[in-house]
């Protein structure tokens, strides 16, 4: 069960990370084009700042779930490597619970703010884009990140209790797709 849910979350978080990467490439393309146009004819892209802000928000928050699930976060190896399997599982459980709490709070309070801004009809300064567009990637990424962290907490709790990994080891070169 844990392994199946891991595969589903991995596929979903990888997809959102790809969308985030496309957003980042879009932000780079808009910024580069804007700079070149300003040098050529002293007029850039109208609304470039609004578009780049939206794309950077999307890139950041949509990539976080994949970073969590692929264990791309930083660990203090000198300390964690000394713990053994159950000690490492306890540290992973604590980190996953803290991550779930933080990302869940961002999603929860962000949703309140998004609803309030949508009610007021807030828009971006230059293009007049609804602020809802800015909230969608933030809420999606933070909610998925919280779900990923809860899954990682269950996985770590299983290892802590049983002393065995919840996931079947894969031979090198056969990474999960």
Image (spheres, rainbow, N blue to C red):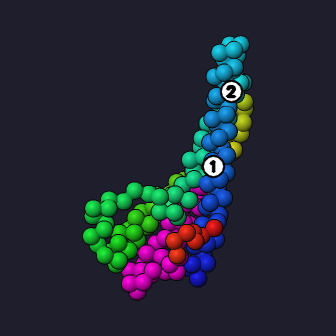
Q: Quadrant of residue 139?
A: bottom right
Query: Who is closer to the viewer here, 150 or 4?
Result: 4
Residue 95 part of the magenta-drawn span: no
Q: Pointer 2: residues within 10 angstroms few (<14), some, or many (20+)? A: some
The residue that disc 2 covers is 33
Name the spot of residue 7 as percent of width and height, x first.
Answer: 61, 72
> Could one spot residue 31 in this view of the protein?
yes
Label 2, label 1: how many angstroms apart (C-alpha)? 20 Å
Q: Nearer the viewer, residue 47 or 11?
A: 11
Look at the image and say whether residue 155 sits in the magenta stretch: yes
Q: Is residue 121 visible?
A: no
Sooner in the amino-acid sequence: mark 2 or mark 1: 1
Query: Which residue corresponds to the image point at 67% horizontal and 24% vertical from the top-left?
Result: 34
- Quadrant for the C terminus, please: bottom right
What element does badge 1 sit on? helix
Segment colored magenta: 141-170
Mark 1, residue position: 20
What is the residue that sits farthest to the front in this orientation? 173
Q: Residue furthest top?
A: 41
Residue at figure coordinates x 63%, y 49% from the top left = 20
- Residue 53: image quadrant is top right
Disc 2 versus disc 1: nearer the observer: 2
Q: Residue shown at 40%/71% (left/top)?
A: 93
* Relative to 146, 160 lies left or right: left
Q: Is residue 83 left or right of residue 115?
A: left
Q: Quadrant of the N terminus?
A: bottom right
The structure residue drawn at horizontal position 47% and vertical position 63%, both measured from the top left corner, is 71
Q: Give x and y (percent) for residue 57.
A: 59, 43
């Amino acid at each position: 069960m844990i392994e199946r849910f891991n595969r589903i979350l991995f596929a979903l978080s990888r997809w959102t990370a790809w969308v985030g990467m496309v957003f980042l490439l879009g932000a780079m393309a808009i910024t580069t084009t804007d700079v070149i146009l300003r040098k050529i004819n002293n007029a850039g892209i109208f609304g470039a700042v609004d578009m780049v802000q939206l794309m950077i928000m999307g890139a950041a928050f949509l990539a976080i779930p994949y970073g969590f699930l692929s264990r791309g976060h930083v660990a203090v190896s000198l300390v964690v490597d000394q713990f053994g399997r159950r000690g490492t599982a306890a540290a992973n459980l604590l980190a996953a619970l803290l991550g779930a709490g933080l990302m869940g709070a961002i999603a929860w309070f962000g949703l309140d703010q998004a609803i309030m801004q949508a009610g007021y009809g807030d828009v971006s300064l230059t293009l007049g884009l609804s602020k809802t567009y800015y909230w969608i990637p933030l809420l999606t990424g933070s909610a998925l990140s919280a779900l990923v962290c809860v899954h990682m907490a269950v996985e770590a709790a299983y290892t802590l209790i049983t002393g065995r990994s919840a996931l079947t080891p894969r031979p090198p070169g056969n990474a999960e797709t």
